[in-house]
Image (tube, rainbow, N blue to C red):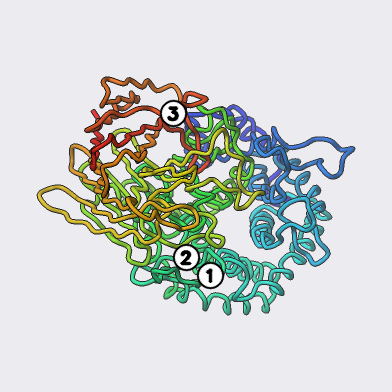
Amino acid sequence: MKRRSFIQLSAFGSMGLMLPLYSCGGTKTSHLLNTSEGFTAFETNAFQLLTTWCDAMIRDQINNPNDKVTHGALYCHACEKIHGRCQESVYPFLYMADKTGDKKYLDAAIKVMDWSVNVDLPDGSWTNMLDPKSWYGTTVFGVIALGEALHYHGHLLPKETKTKWDNRLKRATDFVYKTFDDHFSHINYRFTAIYALSFMGDYFNEEKYKTRSKELALLIPKYLTEPNKLLFGENHPDDKKSAKGLLPVDIGYNVEESLNAVVQYAVHTKDEELLKLLTQSLNSHLEFMLPDGAWDNSFGTRQNKWTYWGSRTTDGCQPAFSMLADRNPAFGTAAVMSTELLQRCTVNGLLAGGLHYQTHGVKPCMHHTFAHAKNLAFVMDNAKKLKKVNKKTPLPRSSNDGVKHFPELDVWLAARGPWRSTVSSYDQIFKKEKSVAATGGSLAVLWHEKVGPIFTASMVEYLLVEPYNQQEQEGEDFCLTPRVERFVNGIWYTNLQDLNAKVNFKDEKGIIDFAIETALTNNKKETLASGGDFKLNYLFDKNQTTIKAQRTTSEANGDTLVLPVISPTGEKVVQVSATKIEIYKKEGIVVVESSVPLTIKKMDKERIFNQVPGMEVVPVLVSFPKNTKEVICIISVV
């Protein structure tokens, strides 16, 4: 060790051990970094959260020297398996070893890298799982993690170990160099390769890496939509347009992975023109952050991995938004708010995939933690460059009023008084029509400044599109997206399957009124021969949200307006009358009142839970009475 010894840092390390391991309501803030290095509140919180996560990962690190297949790996109790990418925890472990002087972190880093031989392939790649036939493209993320670990903290390692790791990193980088071209997989792989090859080109003084990086960087402007410069390419093929002519966009992958890499590249190479373009793109993506730091990916192509804070196997938005906070202070707000939300979603020391894992008794997947820990380590290693990162500047969705349409998505963001909402008619479907996110003119998100989320969309049907990267559903599969529906001979018809829904809106006299024309459709995209057409209205004023559903027939045919109201287990629910339900939250009471009787769906447990985006709901059902064409529901918060 050249710069410092563990003995010299032992006092600092013991102070770190006094920090609380975890808090399900968000970790407490330590003043350790404030007093020792003058860090900002953001960096102090990031360090505290990183400490919490790393300690929990060490707690779940397998210690069985007699079993080379498992010894040193991080065991995922949620998935009951080892995730092959857990070796990427080497970076946060080495950061913590360097910062605290606690040898347990260095030991953990060495153990997890020793274990990584179990996911080695002869061509230099690492596989995503222990199965040697599993996906290998994730090697690029391992390259960045190990590369940054060695760049910033390699001085901690014995010479023999560092040489071994350097050689392994070189083989993995060669694999990325040889394999990643301008058509490789989804766009996030190519965009992360841009940064990986540039960074490794400097680390190894290898010009061919930097040359390939520059070649791939030419792709960046080509993968930004018009007019809002949103990044597309999260589907296969990556540029195939939908029937409406819309390209595949996923907000979660963009902000938590791809944009990080290209911003890191642009900063690393000091490419000012690219930084200006990326600032435009970040500005547009920031429109989708809710006022509590959540990323609205209700409609994204890879919504199957949407968590309320982002996306399951991505790394977090902190690097891109913190590094460019000097260009737009609201970027700093995004980095801070996202980190605070990650704290609130941390359960038993690990990052859970949404707000309600603890209340529903669902274990958090290990993958979330080691992935997001990498980016917090990067932020801490670059803290001296990030002094403008704070949350003094409001987010766009905190201060906006009115409606903004994103034509490249056919998605509308609305704001009126305390209400924030998302309406989606986006018709891009992931994995060849299998994974359906919010569409059909659905009210994909409803959010209130007093109580937070009231509605959030889920997959229409929960499918393990990526079995290694999704958790099994707990209990019945119940879609969380508000909708109208009808069952005919056991077949489900709903507006959520309608890829041809038409949306219009007007904003008059203080009321935003969305008008949707839609048809009840099944999962084969077949509409009902008759009586399946609906008109929906979502009306927002500063006092309430009103949902109207009007059908073309008044016959008693089982039509139902379904309103899955976000509510964790433990909140009191009172049916005040046949037409009124109240849900008591700490911050206020959510009131649902209908023009006709409403009921709560029978459940096996106190709440229904959905992995997308990690929420529990009270499923409120408003059935159309015979001879009634229209039902009206009013939602208010008191």
At x 35%, y 27%, the residue is: 599
Q: Look at the picture and state if 605 lies above or below 382.
A: above
Q: Are marks 3 and 2 in contact (CB under 8 Å)?
A: no
Q: Is residue 30 visible?
A: no
Helix, strand or loop at disc 3?
Answer: loop
Q: Position of residue 409 (x, y in %)?
A: 38, 63
Question: Front-most of 198 and 617?
Answer: 617
Which residue bears the numbered disc 3? 568
Where residue 160 sits, quadrant-wise, is bottom right
> Callout 2: 10 Å neighbours few (<14), some, many (20+)?
many
Q: Position of residue 124 (x, y in %)?
A: 78, 65
Helix, strand or loop at disc 2?
Answer: loop
**With 18 as the anchor, is 529 left or right in this view?**
left
At x 40%, y 23%, the residue is: 571
Helix, strand or loop at disc 1?
Answer: loop
Three-letter code, disc 2: Pro
Which residue bears the numbered disc 1? 238
> Callout 3: 10 Å neighbours few (<14), some, many (20+)?
many
Three-letter code, disc 1: Asp
Which residue bears the numbered disc 2? 248
Between discs 3 and 2, the one toward the N terminus: 2
How much space separates mark 3 and mark 1, taking CA atoms? 37 Å
**With 404 as the anchor, is 271 left or right in this view?**
right
Three-letter code, disc 3: Pro
Q: Are marks 3 and 1 in contact (CB under 8 Å)?
A: no
Between discs 3 and 1, the one toward the N terminus: 1
How much space separates mark 1 and mark 2, taking CA atoms? 7 Å
